[in-house]
Image (cartoon, grey):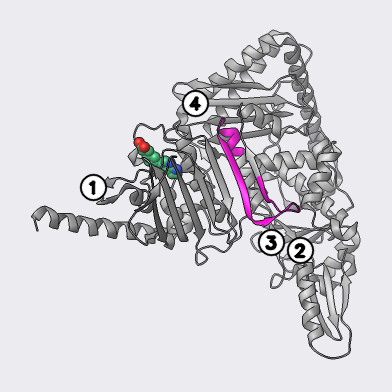
Amino acid sequence: MSDENIEDKTNYSANNIQVLEGLEAVRKRPAMYIGDVGFRGLHHLVYEVIDNSIDEALAGHCDSIQVYIEEDNSVTVVDNGRGIPTGYHDKEKRSALEVVMTVLHAGGKFDKDTYKVSGGLHGVGVSCVNALSIALRVEVHREGKIFEQEYSKGVPLYDVREIGTSEISGTTVTFRPDGEIFDERIYNYETLENRIRELSYLNKGITISITDRRETDENDEFITSTFKSEVGLKEFVSYLDSNREQLIDDIIYMDGEKNGIPVEVALVYNTSYSENLHSYVNNINTHEGGTHLQGFRRGLTSTLKKYAEESGLLTKLKFEIAGDDFREGLTAVISVKVQEPQFEGQTKTKLGNREVNAPVSQAVSEMLTNYLEENPKDAKTIVHKVILAAQARNAARKAREMVQRKNVMSGHSLPGKLADCASRDPFLSEIFLVEGDSAGGTAKQGRNRENQAIMPLRGKILNVEKALSYKIFENEEIRNIYTALGVKVGTEEDSMALDISKLRYHKVVIMCDADVDGSHIETLILTFFFRYMKELIDNGNIFIATPPLYLVKKGSDHRYAWNDDQRDMMVQEMKGKGTETSVGIQRYKGLGEMNAEQLWATTMNPENRTLRQITIDSGAEADRVFSMLMGDEVPPRRAFIESHAKYAKIDT
Ligand code: 0RA
């Protein structure tokens, strides 16, 4: 044996130890790599794998990606790229494929020419997915051959092996998340579908499909969706606004490069009053905004302001137009690709790179200037809308000031309908927003008054989707929510700025009847939080209570069921217990059908209750769904409600 060989062996085991240490680090602190080990983290694994295929597509070598949810909740991602290289890697003493699959951050290192920008929220790569999978198999078609390797918890089960010949090229990865790591195991088709739709808009020209192999529909076929966008963000904006009325003829669009930074922007004005801006960096939704969004706003405001001033349309206005006024009824998506993104903020979704601001601002300015010059009619319509927004903002300021003055005059600022809790510690306190005065009364009797506050809401609260923002602040129920929560809105510069530093309860629980009306009210309240207090949703403060649907009883044996399966199982079990006494089922529709003890035991007691925390998978999709649910068009709303209904079957 030569010296060289000995050294090789040492190197090999040294590398091996490093790999194991890397995988172990991921398994020890999975949240550090994928965010969390719940629903989000579970789905994040899929995004991480798809991202590699998208990178291959962005490099110009792949135009088709298929995703399958398998029967056992494993996921397969197939692409027609070049295939991960399988040759021997001299330095690592093993197949390049094995290196990509097992070494953290190794993914991009083999292909220096590729303009690589995606790479997931945390950019951890497929090796991280591998480490968190109880089983993973990769199959590569490349140079006329097929190769495979399998792993468990990231450790290879055998060396990369050749298993056949092939005329195509591409990579297929199938993985099953490790149940020891994840609290959630079940993939949600719609969550993945939404992300895939979004990815297809963000990366035009790529066909991406998703198929659910777990169950078939009434025609015995798997549920599947295929997405391909020819025109990118222009189509995205039109999808987002499909339930709103467009104010101008075209969607304003540009796709280009500024100072070496690829910038794609699409925007349109509609007749609504809300601002819907969605921004992306390297395909990642930047919820918290950042320098690209600042650039967008600056470009939009300065261009429209200049145009409005030069056109003489502002002469009659007695006050300044603010930044917000340019964004009322605006739907826009902006996507930039940044080589070395710096992500900041609480959820690491805020772009910090200062060099991105100016190029985006310039791009937006140029695009908009051209459009306004070429479409004077639309330009006028937009300026008119801006002036109306400014006037409404002025009215809103007056309404708000009046409210604040009233509060000061009456000496106490909490709403009369609020039954507050004793505790003044927001971290221990919760508030239940309850549908109707009568259920509110029951909740007041049943609660733990030490830390549970109750505020009844009268009937249907205002549909904020259809109201001007100053109308919203004139609405009593909504003002009560603001004052009870201790949330302040509006500063001199930004009429929508939210101050949640004095939030009085860290859990805000929406408690509605388990029927069609209740779920409508739930949606109205959620729409309000989504449009006007989104920070609370992002912070994880908003919850929905889940009252039981059934009381199943036999003699003195009383049990609650939250769904039909549970109910049927209880009935079977109780019947099995011999005696003649019959089993009775009571269907709860309203909270009012429960007495205070029952409501406490099933729905309010932290020891037994289930609270559903409201989170947003996709801000863009949530925006579209709320505008549809609360908008004027009936058919899409009915279709959505029928496919998502919790209670419709029972009540119709
Ligand atoms: C590194 C180099 C090359 C391809 C890839 C990675 C690659 C990775 C993945 C992951 C999923 N699908 C993928 N497709 C390709 C190409 C090197 C070359 O052929 O020159």
- Closer mark to the observer between disc 1 and disc 3: 1
Read off the residue under disc 4.
Answer: 262
Q: CA distance from mark 2 to mark 1?
A: 57 Å
Three-letter amino acid code of the residue under disc 2: Thr
Please tell me which of labels 3 and 4 falls first in the chain: 4
Choose between 572 and 557: the one closer to the eye: 572
Tag 4 and tag 1, C-beta contact below 8 Å: no
Q: Does ligand 1 reach within 8 Å of label 2's beta carbon?
A: no
| Quadrant field for ligand 1 | top left
10 Å crowding of disc 1: few (<14), some (14-19), many (20+): few
Work out whether residue 101 can be spotted.
yes
Please tell me which of labels 4 and 1 falls first in the chain: 1
Residue 609 rendering spot, x and y as whole percentages: 72, 69
Badge 2 marks a residue whose secondary structure is loop
Q: Which mark is residue 424?
A: 3
Q: Residue, x 68% and y 9% (percent of image)?
A: 374
Residue 558 rendering spot, x and y as whole percentages: 82, 80
Badge 3 marks a residue whose secondary structure is loop
Residue 207 lies in magenta, yes or no?
Answer: yes
Badge 1 marks a residue whose secondary structure is loop
Q: Which residues are magenta?
A: 198-224
Three-letter amino acid code of the residue under disc 3: Arg
Three-letter amino acid code of the residue under disc 1: Lys
Q: Tell me if residue 308 comes above or below residue 28 in the rendering.
A: above
- Closer mark to the observer between disc 4 and disc 1: 1
Badge 4 marks a residue whose secondary structure is strand
